[in-house]
Image (tube, rainbow, N blue to C red):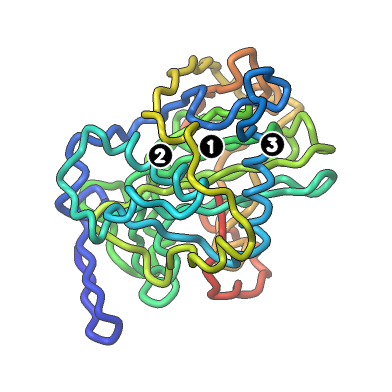
């Protein structure tokens, strides 16, 4: 499947699995959760004296979130010279997840990154969605996904939910064909639920439906801050730009630091498996989603108790097949075409 346009000087070819063609050999697309990703130590750590702490990084994120209105880009060829600590973190994430992959062009590959910050007492949730090249989808109806989507948690808060196997169905492809290797009506039999913890990172296949569940947040009175980074190979999302040097300097963003200079050595973390019972009185509604806000819905609800936290903080809830279907009671208005920052 290919898209070629002379008007915007763009050529995109997808393979049979709906990924960018000709790259990604050696990539691990399975759901992964890791602790101790290279983030600063907590402020209460005695060893943190005279060096940045995670609270400093959170302040950097809040400043960057305030000064930017869209996602940011760091090209693979520029990763040896980051202009601030946040770019350094984005580069560390890209390098960590591509260390077994070398079949990509560094000039067109890189990491798309942004901040997701929710103030105390506000809705921490994020509507279900698929990560994609937003402009390509809006203007041409084509889905180009990142190889991997990652979430690095800097605080606690509402959990991220990922629906394993739920790629974009035919009903959401605007009449474009479904890649040969994908089902036009995909089915999910496992839902990952990740509760935030500072320094924890999750990574998952960039083609999967996901969101944030506000109603399951254990700490709605606290600020929720996450660093989002999507790994792209052989494709630069249209319209994304690097953080301007004068902006980073003018806002006093922290320069690259030693805590991120070290090679990433995160620790794999346990995922607790649960089996969702059928029926019950506490069924959780995942809500509607789509371009107008209410185009689609899921065929099933899961017991809220099965999605609740565990000691591991990360769950795999096994369930009967969940599919995406059209919502027959639509009434939303078309969203702005501005590239939205989502998780």
The numbered mark at residue 182 is: none
Above or below, 116 relative to 282: below
Residue tagged 2: 93
Q: In this view, does 262 lie to the left or right of 310?
A: left
**Residue 196 showing in the rendered view:** no
Rounded to the nearest angstrom, the CA distance separating label 1 from label 2 is 9 Å
User: Whole-percent x and y of residue 181?
Assistant: 22, 47
Give the residue displayed 23% in from the left and 66% down from the top: 12
Which label's residue is closer to the chain start, 1 or 2? Answer: 2
Above or below, 294 relative to 285: below
Q: Judge depth for marks 3 and 2 and give the one in front.
A: 3
Give the residue displayed 42% in from the left and 48% down from the top: 230
Give the residue displayed 62% in from the left and 29% down from the top: 198
Q: In which quarter of the image is residue 157?
A: top right
Q: In this view, does 222 lie to the left or right of 144?
A: right
User: Whole-percent x and y of residue 213?
Assistant: 67, 40
Residue tagged 3: 55
**Residue 204 showing in the rendered view:** yes
Q: In which quarter of the image is residue 88?
A: top left
Which label's residue is closer to the chain start, 3 or 2? Answer: 3
Which label's residue is closer to the chain start, 3 or 1? Answer: 3
> Considering the numbered disc 3 on the image, is that residue within a helix, a strand or a loop?
helix
Q: Which of 263 and 35 is in front in this view?
A: 263
Give the residue displayed 53% in from the left and 75% down from the top: 337
């Amino acid at each position: 499947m290919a898209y070629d346009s002379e008007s915007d000087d763009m050529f995109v070819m997808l393979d049979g699995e709906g990924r960018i063609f000709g790259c990604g050999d050696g990539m691990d697309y399975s759901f992964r959760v890791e602790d101790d990703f290279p983030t600063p130590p907590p402020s209460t750590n005695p060893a943190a004296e005279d060096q940045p702490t995670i609270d400093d990084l959170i302040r950097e994120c809040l400043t960057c979130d305030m000064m930017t209105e869209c996602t940011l880009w760091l090209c693979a060829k520029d990763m040896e010279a980051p202009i601030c600590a946040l770019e350094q973190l984005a580069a560390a994430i890209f390098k960590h997840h591509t260390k077994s992959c070398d079949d990509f062009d560094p000039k067109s590959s890189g990491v798309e990154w942004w901040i997701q910050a929710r103030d105390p007492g506000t809705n921490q949730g994020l509507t279900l969605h698929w990560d994609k090249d937003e402009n390509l989808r809006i203007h041409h109806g084509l889905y180009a996904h990142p190889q991997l989507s990652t979430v690095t948690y800097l605080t606690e808060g509402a959990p991220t939910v990922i629906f394993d196997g739920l790629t974009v169905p035919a009903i959401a492809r605007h009449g474009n064909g479904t890649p040969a290797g994908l089902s036009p009506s995909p089915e999910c039999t496992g839902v990952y639920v990740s509760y935030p913890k500072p320094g924890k990172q999750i990574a998952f296949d960039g083609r999967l439906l996901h969101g944030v569940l506000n109603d399951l947040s254990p700490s709605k009175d606290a600020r929720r801050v996450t660093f989002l980074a999507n790994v792209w190979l052989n494709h630069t999302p249209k319209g994304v730009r690097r953080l301007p040097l004068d902006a980073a300097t003018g806002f006093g963003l922290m320069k690259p630091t030693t805590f991120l200079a070290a090679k990433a050595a995160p620790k794999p973390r346990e995922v607790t498996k649960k089996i969702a019972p059928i029926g019950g009185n506490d069924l959780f509604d995942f809500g509607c989603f789509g371009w107008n806000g209410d185009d689609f819905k899921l065929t099933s609800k899961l017991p809220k108790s099965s999605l609740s936290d565990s000691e591991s903080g990360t769950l795999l809830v096994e369930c009967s097949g969940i599919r995406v279907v059209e919502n027959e009671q639509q009434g939303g208005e078309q969203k702005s075409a501005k590239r939205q920052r989502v998780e």
